[in-house]
Image (cartoon, helix red, strand yellow):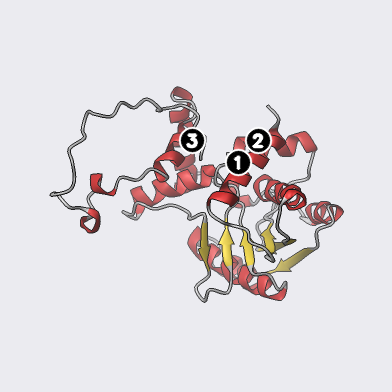
């Protein structure tokens, strides 16, 4: 398999399907130092050269005191690609580590998002690209179902609260297996976050459960993604979308023909 070609196709599908990038956009790419965000930056650069519209790219990294090694090597690599890189130390996050060493992911995420908006504003960007993958969408779906009682996941495109920025996730159809293979093939330096190694967390537990299911049912993640694009509101319990007079009984009429097959998104 040509990993680069596969990545270009999947990222291109996501961008086209959800109108992620538009003419004149200045995109600030959030690079965490890990394989996913670095892959995203590289693929966006390749697409930039081929795209029929003009858009510009810059990259930034937020230091929250959780990297397992200095991120300078990642920054040097980004700059070698011709992309300007901003390294921002978020002092409130560092104080958070000192004051609340056992704080949850949500609190850390809020601190990071505030810093991201501040950085993007300084970079004069109108779009912020995050490296969430298909794995992240699947995990978010199950996390919301199991722990918040909501049927939702990470959206492909949204806007900031004040509509200052459009937030995009170009890797929604890309698995971490692909980003890992791509980074290994190019020998790109990556610096993981210490949180990724924590055991006993909700996120890690869900990730391990999905991995276990996938040993028996290959391509499970692709079908979870397909389910998010193939919602039948009348078959759920939300009364806002339920009308018994116009809801036909189709139980048993549809064969699960596509189950556990690779899904190609239109």
Q: Earlier in the sequence, mark 3 or mark 1?
A: 1
For marks 3 and 1, give the one nearer the viewer.
Answer: 1
- Image coordinates of residue 15 in percent, x first then y, are 59, 51
Q: Residues within 10 Å of mark 3 (few under 14, many from 20)?
A: many
Residue 58 seen: no
What is the distance, in whole Å, between disc 3 and disc 2 at their CAs?
Answer: 14 Å
Q: Are marks 1 and 2 in contact (CB under 8 Å)?
A: yes
Instruction: Point out the image quarter for the N terminus.
Output: top right
Q: Residues within 10 Å of mark 2 (few under 14, many from 20)?
A: few
SS for dot 3: helix
> Is residue 56 depicted above or below 124 in this figure?
above
- What residue is pinned by disc 3? 222
Residue found at x 41% / y 48%? 141
Query: 219 and 108: which one is in front?
Result: 219
Residue 27 at x, y percent in the picture: 68, 63
Q: Position of residue 250 (x, y in %)?
A: 21, 35
Q: Secondary structure at mark 2?
A: helix
Residue 33 visible in the snapshot: yes
**On the rendered structure, is 10 left or right of 31?**
left
Residue 10 numbered tag: 1
Neighbours of disc 1 within 10 Å: few (<14), some (14-19), many (20+): many
Label 1 element class: helix
In the rendered image, residue 39, in percent from the top left (x then y), is placed at 70, 46
Disc 2 designates what residue?
A: 6
Identity of the residue drawn at 44% across and 23% down? 216
Q: Which circle, 3 or 2, is nearer the viewer?
A: 2
Left or right, residue 157 beside residue 247: right
Q: Are marks 3 and 1 in contact (CB under 8 Å)?
A: no
Query: Residue 71, which numbered label?
Result: none
Write down the quadrant of residue 71 in the picture.
Answer: bottom right
Residue 175 versus residue 74 in the image, above or below: above
Q: Nearer the viewer, residue 94 or 151?
A: 151
């Amino acid at each position: 398999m040509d990993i680069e070609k596969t990545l270009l196709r999947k990222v291109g599908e996501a961008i086209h399907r959800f109108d992620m990038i538009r003419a004149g956009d200045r995109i600030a790419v959030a690079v965490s130092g890990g394989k996913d965000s670095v892959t995203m930056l590289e693929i966006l650069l390749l697409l930039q050269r081929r795209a029929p519209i003009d858009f510009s790219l810059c990259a930034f990294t937020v230091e929250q005191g959780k990297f397992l090694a200095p991120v300078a090597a990642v920054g040097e690599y980004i700059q070698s690609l011709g992309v300007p890189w901003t390294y921002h130390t978020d002092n409130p996050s560092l104080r958070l580590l000192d004051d609340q060493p056992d704080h949850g992911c949500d609190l850390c995420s809020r601190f990071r998002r505030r810093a991201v908006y501040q950085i993007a504003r300084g970079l004069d960007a109108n779009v912020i690209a995050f490296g969430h993958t298909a794995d992240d969408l699947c995990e978010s779906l199950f996390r919301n179902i199991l722990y918040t009682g909501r049927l939702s996941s990470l959206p492909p495109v949204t806007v900031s609260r004040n509509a200052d920025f459009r937030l995009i996730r170009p890797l929604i159809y890309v698995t971490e297996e692909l980003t890992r293979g791509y980074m290994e093939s190019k020998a790109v330096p990556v610096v993981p976050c210490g949180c990724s190694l924590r055991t006993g967390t909700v996120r890690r537990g869900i990730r391990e459960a999905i991995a276990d299911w996938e040993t028996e049912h290959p391509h499970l993640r692709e079908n979870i993604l397909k389910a998010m694009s193939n919602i039948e509101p009348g078959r759920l319990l939300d009364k806002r979308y339920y009308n018994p007079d116009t809801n036909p009984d189709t139980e048993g009429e549809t064969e699960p023909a596509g189950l556990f097959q690779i899904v190609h998104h239109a």
